[in-house]
């Protein structure tokens, strides 16, 4: 009897073991997932979990001839609404009686649109595997496992709605196989008619809109990372204005096709104590160090070794 039980368990493991997908098929599959987040009409509620922190968000996503439109409504904490129309973002803060609008050249990377549209080098960094099927939020999904080929990135698990390729759940997995953070739809309606009025702001904001351009055009700042981890490439370089700062901050963005790492460079104020060292929160690692008269800060959803390697190899080779 014990031998029969062993054989059944062994057979089950064989059936449900993750199956590698070849590189070209992986790229085509992930492109479909990336495109679906921008091209499919859907509405629902998803949760974000990191450690003991859980946040809920309602999302409305619509696509028409004029482009992509979306509204996010925070369901926990202070009321917030974010509305996207193309490259324009509108942020509503009713408790502060204010609204902020801005344009961004760098594409939005929020759930379920966490994958970029350009994924040609992904197979160099991850092995994509088919990890079976699962029913999620009322839909049948295909499960994919993305295993890193080195220690500079985390593993990812993706749950994909089979009919539309829309991402229903995404988990980031640490080196000890525990889930570091995850997004998941608890309710979603895919397709059908979406009332355009749902995309309008509903929060009472009487104050005039504050116009703020987060990026002042793509630039060549002279700042470079000499020793990037394998697979990471620069995807953006800009000057940004942040709340509480009276001067623009140089912002470099590097990505391996799934995760992004940001490098911020700002001048050190005379007499100010620079930040140094590493800090972590869930999947996010931060590394800071002074360099000449500047403060270097690197932030990314990567292992500590990645942000430290990037931060330690930031140099300046030209005019700011």
Image (spheres, rainbow, N blue to C red):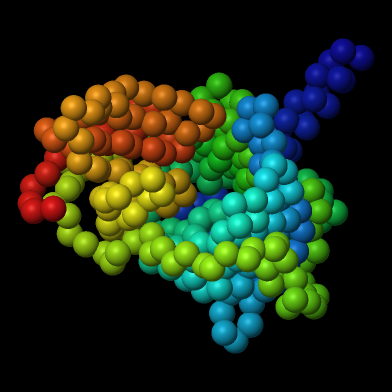
Extreme residue toward the left, this view = 318
Q: Which sits in the foreground, 38 or 289? A: 289
Q: Furthest-bottom residue in view?
A: 65
Q: Nearer the viewer, residue 108 or 37?
A: 108
Q: Is residue 25 visible?
A: no
x and y, in percent, of residue 210 in the image: 47, 64
Q: Position of residue 114 (x, y in %)?
A: 54, 53
Residue at image point 63% right, 82% down:
64
Q: Residue furthest front?
A: 207
Q: Please determine whether, in this image, residue 192 is positioned above or below residue 158.
A: below
Say if 60 sits above or below 93 in the image. Answer: below
Q: Nearer the viewer, residue 320 or 280?
A: 320
Q: What residue do we see at 57% from left, 59% from top?
A: 98
Give the image location of residue 223, x and y in percent: 17, 48
- Residue 276: % across, % down: 28, 23
Residue at the spot 64% in from the left edge and 63% down from the top edge: 205
Residue 180 shows up from this direction? yes
Q: Residue furthest right?
A: 1
Residue at 30% x, 64% y is 216
Q: Quadrant of residue 174?
A: top right
- Total tally of numbered discs in the picture: 0
């Amino acid at each position: 009897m014990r031998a029969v039980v062993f054989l059944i368990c062994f057979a089950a493991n064989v059936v449900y073991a993750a199956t590698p997908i070849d590189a070209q098929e992986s790229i085509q599959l992930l492109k479909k997932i990336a495109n679906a987040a921008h091209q499919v009409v859907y509405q629902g509620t998803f949760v974000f979990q990191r450690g003991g922190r859980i946040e809920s968000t309602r999302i409305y996503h619509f696509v028409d001839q004029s482009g992509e439109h979306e509204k996010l409504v925070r369901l926990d904490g202070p009321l917030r609404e974010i509305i996207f129309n193309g490259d324009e973002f509108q942020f509503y803060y009713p408790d502060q009686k204010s609204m902020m609008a801005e344009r961004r050249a760098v594409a939005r990377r929020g759930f379920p649109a966490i994958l970029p549209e350009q994924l040609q080098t992904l197979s160099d960094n991850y092995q994509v595997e088919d990890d079976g099927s699962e029913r999620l939020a009322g839909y049948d999904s295909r499960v994919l496992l993305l295993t890193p080929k080195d220690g500079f990135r985390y593993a990812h698990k993706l749950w994909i709605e089979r009919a539309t390729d829309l991402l229903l759940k995404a988990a980031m997995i640490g080196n000890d196989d525990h889930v570091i953070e995850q997004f998941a739809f608890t309710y979603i309606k895919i397709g059908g008619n979406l009332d355009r009025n749902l995309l309008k702001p509903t929060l009472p904001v009487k104050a005039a809109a504050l116009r703020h351009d987060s990026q002042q055009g793509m630039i060549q700042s002279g700042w470079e990372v000499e020793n990037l981890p394998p697979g990471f490439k620069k995807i953006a370089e800009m000057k940004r204005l942040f709340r509480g700062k009276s001067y623009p901050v140089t912002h470099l963005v590097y990505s391996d096709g799934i995760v992004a790492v940001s490098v911020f460079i700002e001048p050190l104020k005379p007499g100010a104590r620079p930040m140094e060292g590493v800090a972590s929160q869930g999947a996010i690692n931060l590394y800071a160090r002074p360099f000449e008269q500047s403060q270097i800060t690197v932030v990314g959803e990567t292992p500590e070794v990645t942000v430290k390697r990037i931060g330690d190899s930031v140099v300046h080779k030209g005019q700011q």
